[in-house]
């Protein structure tokens, strides 16, 4: 890491002090969730303590994705996913499934699948319905399709669109609903808060699905944002636009980067306060939505040490509610004790 020495020095003491005894989810009228890596869970760990104390909704960070659940044709690996489902039941946490259909984290056999259009559709349908049936009654909601639109608002070219055509999105929702009629079904995507072209395309598609009676009940706005962008006015505009769908809205993968440009920085009090203020604005704006549309908010990771951003972007960043030592940051404190 660029800042090994600086990072080590900043870990000598908590970044901030606040009363963290009250569960964070108890502050809000909607569920407050976190993306979980089950490998980090153990009864004696701070990771498990914080995950169960402050969050009443869980999204599996990776283990429900196709490469984990469906590693070989005709073979499913339920072990880790079943353990997480049992964990959520034991701690009275909602489990939100992520994700049935995506163009990434595919097993090799699926990415290289060959066959007729009918064979492709059978594979697609069986994948969705086998998973939904397995978790029926355990998973209350699904990100059925993830990130299907490109930045210019067109449908992303993936193995699904190439072999099944644009109708694969509608079919995915219908197949999921047929397999588990009680689960709430979401479309999930990123940059909807900062790219109005993409947002308009997604919202127009959702409107078409509603008119066609397709069982889409919710929209996930990922909200991988930073202290630099988007502007607060853009966040408010995105939520106002999304509200017009009447769907349940999930801020589904929240993190707030303080180092989006990958510079040599340390998490100074000023940067952490900007992070806290940005997050507080986002949550306040979300609270202004009609209660029936507030599906909940979910943070994409528990602590800075668990963030995907460090490995994916190859940079030091500190985008979550707890620091590397699982100590609360100003962002947590401001959410736990809103002004």
Image (spheres, rainbow, N blue to C red):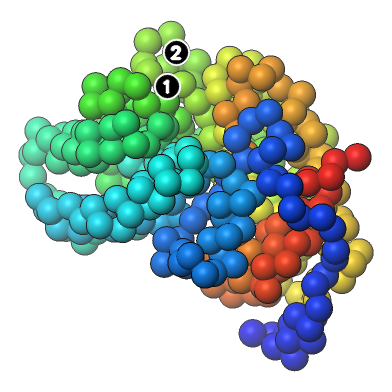
Mark 2 in CB contact with mark 1 (< 8 angstroms):
yes
Q: Is residue 252 above or below residue 265?
A: above
Q: Is residue 226 above or below residue 144?
A: below
Residue 112 shows up from this direction: no
Instruction: For mark 1, give the secondary structure.
Output: loop
Using the image, tell me which numbered label, if any, was put on residue 233: none
Residue 158 shows up from this direction: yes
Look at the image and tell me in which quarter the C terminus lies.
top right
> Residue beneath label 1, please?
216
Instruction: For mark 2, give the secondary structure.
Output: helix
Give whichever of 259, 29 is nearer the camera. 29
Using the image, tell me which numbered label, if any, was put on residue 210: 2
Is tag 2's residue or tag 1's residue first in the polypeptide sequence? 2
Q: Residue at x 46, y 32 (%)?
A: 187
Look at the image and tell me in which quarter the N terminus lies.
bottom right
Residue 167 on image: x %, y %: 30, 26
Residue 273 relative to residue 1: left or right: right
């Amino acid at each position: 890491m660029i800042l090994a020495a600086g990072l080590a020095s900043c870990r000598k003491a908590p970044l901030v002090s606040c009363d963290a005894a009250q569960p964070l989810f108890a502050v809000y009228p909607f569920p407050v969730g976190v993306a979980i890596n089950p490998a980090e869970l153990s009864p004696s760990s701070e990771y498990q303590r914080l995950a169960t104390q402050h969050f009443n909704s869980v999204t599996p960070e990776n283990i429900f994705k196709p490469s984990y659940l469906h590693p070989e044709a005709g073979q499913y690996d339920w072990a880790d996913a079943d353990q997480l489902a049992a964990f959520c039941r034991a701690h009275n946490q909602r489990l939100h499934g992520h994700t049935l259909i995506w163009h990434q984290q595919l097993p090799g056999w699926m990415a290289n699948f060959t066959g007729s259009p009918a064979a492709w559709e059978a594979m697609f349908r069986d994948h969705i319905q086998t998973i939904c049936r397995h978790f029926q009654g355990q998973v209350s909601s699904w990100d059925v399709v993830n990130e299907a639109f490109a930045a210019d608002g067109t449908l992303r070219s993936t193995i699904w669109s190439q072999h099944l055509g644009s109708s694969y999105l509608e079919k995915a929702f219908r197949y999921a609903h047929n397999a588990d009629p009680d689960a709430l079904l979401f479309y999930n995507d990123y940059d909807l808060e900062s790219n109005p072209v993409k947002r308009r395309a997604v919202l127009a598609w959702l409107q078409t699905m509603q008119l066609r009676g397709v069982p889409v009940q919710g929209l996930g706005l990922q909200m991988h944002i930073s202290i630099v962008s988007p502007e607060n006015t853009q966040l408010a505009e995105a939520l106002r636009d999304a509200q017009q769908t009447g769907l349940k809205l999930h801020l589904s993968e929240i993190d707030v980067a303080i180092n989006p440009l990958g510079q040599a920085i340390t998490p100074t009090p000023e940067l952490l306060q900007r992070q806290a203020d940005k997050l507080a604005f986002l949550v306040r704006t979300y609270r202004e939505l009609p209660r029936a549309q507030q599906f909940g908010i979910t943070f994409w990771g528990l602590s800075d040490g668990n963030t995907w951003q460090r490995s994916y972007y190859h940079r030091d960043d500190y985008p979550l509610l707890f620091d590397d030592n699982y100590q609360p940051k100003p962002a947590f404190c401001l959410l736990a004790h809103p002004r």
